[in-house]
Image (cartoon, rainbow, N blue to C red):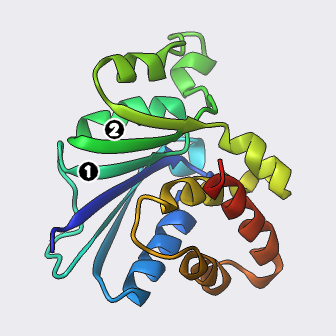
Amino acid sequence: MKTTNVMIVGVGGQGSLLASKLLGRLLIDEGYDVKVSEVHGMSQRGGSVVTYVRFGEKVYSPIITEGEADYIISFEKLEAARYAKYLNKNGLIVVNTQQIDPMPVIIGAAEYPAQVLDELTAKGIHIEALDALSLAEQAGSSKAVNIVLMGKVAKQFDISYDKWIKAIENTVAPKFVEMNKKAFDLGYNS
């Protein structure tokens, strides 16, 4: 069995670590060998956060190098562009269309690239984009963007919907389970 490589990328505070925990738990429950590695930039200051999730029959390293990622789950458009070089030629980026300005844009030293997703698509990169923020708000909280994105990417894996829901129930704090299940459904059916 081939090792599958998933990168979860975002900005600090978006819930990428919970998303990787959810995915890791689900994959372990499915019997895969799973390695997870988290790379925190200036996450508390809105900087990049990257999580690698690798799974298969036997996985020896948690690190994904350039050109190896089968999937990139991006919580923000510019983060998708920042990590696109890690995607393999047959890979998929699932991206939230939300724009979060990095510090150089905030202070006026740079401009946010307006057509960033179009530029990636023009390079032949397969992208599935969705307004995960609106769907998360519809579910009950803007903080559920992570679970909306997991719902969107869930159909890429040979794991039943019910098992994803069970993983949410086992990973998310009890008071947030129903809201996260709704967020997952909205992403799954988008």
- Give neighbour class at mark 2: few <14, some 14-19, many 20+ (Cα, 10 Å): some
Q: Quadrant of the N terminus?
A: bottom left
Q: Position of residue 100 (x, y in %)?
A: 62, 31
From this viewpoint, is residue 15 visible?
no
Can you identify the residue that label 1 sits on? 69
Res 64 quadrant in image: bottom left
Q: Secondary structure at mark 1?
A: strand
Q: Nearer the viewer, residue 139 or 20?
A: 139
Can you identify the residue that label 2 sits on? 83
Mark closer to the chain start, 2 or 1: 1
Q: Position of residue 124 (x, y in %)?
A: 28, 25
Q: Nearer the viewer, residue 7 or 50?
A: 7
Q: Secondary structure at mark 2?
A: helix
**Residue at 23% of width from left, 75% of height from top?**
56
Q: Position of residue 115 (x, y in %)?
A: 50, 13
**Residue at 43% of width from left, 89% of height from top?**
29
Res 189 quadrant in image: bottom right
**Residue at 64% of width from left, 33% of height from top?**
98
Q: Amino acid at mark 2?
A: Tyr
Name the disc covering residue 150, or none.
none
Residue 122 position (above or below residue 63):
above
Q: Position of residue 186 (x, y in %)?
A: 71, 55
- Give neighbour class at mark 1: few <14, some 14-19, many 20+ (Cα, 10 Å): many
From this viewpoint, is residue 28 visible?
yes
| Residues at marks 2 and 1 touching, judged by CB atoms closer than 8 Å | yes
Q: Is residue 141 left or right of residue 79?
A: right
Alpha carbons under labels 2 and 1: distance apart: 10 Å
Q: Amino acid at mark 1?
A: Ala
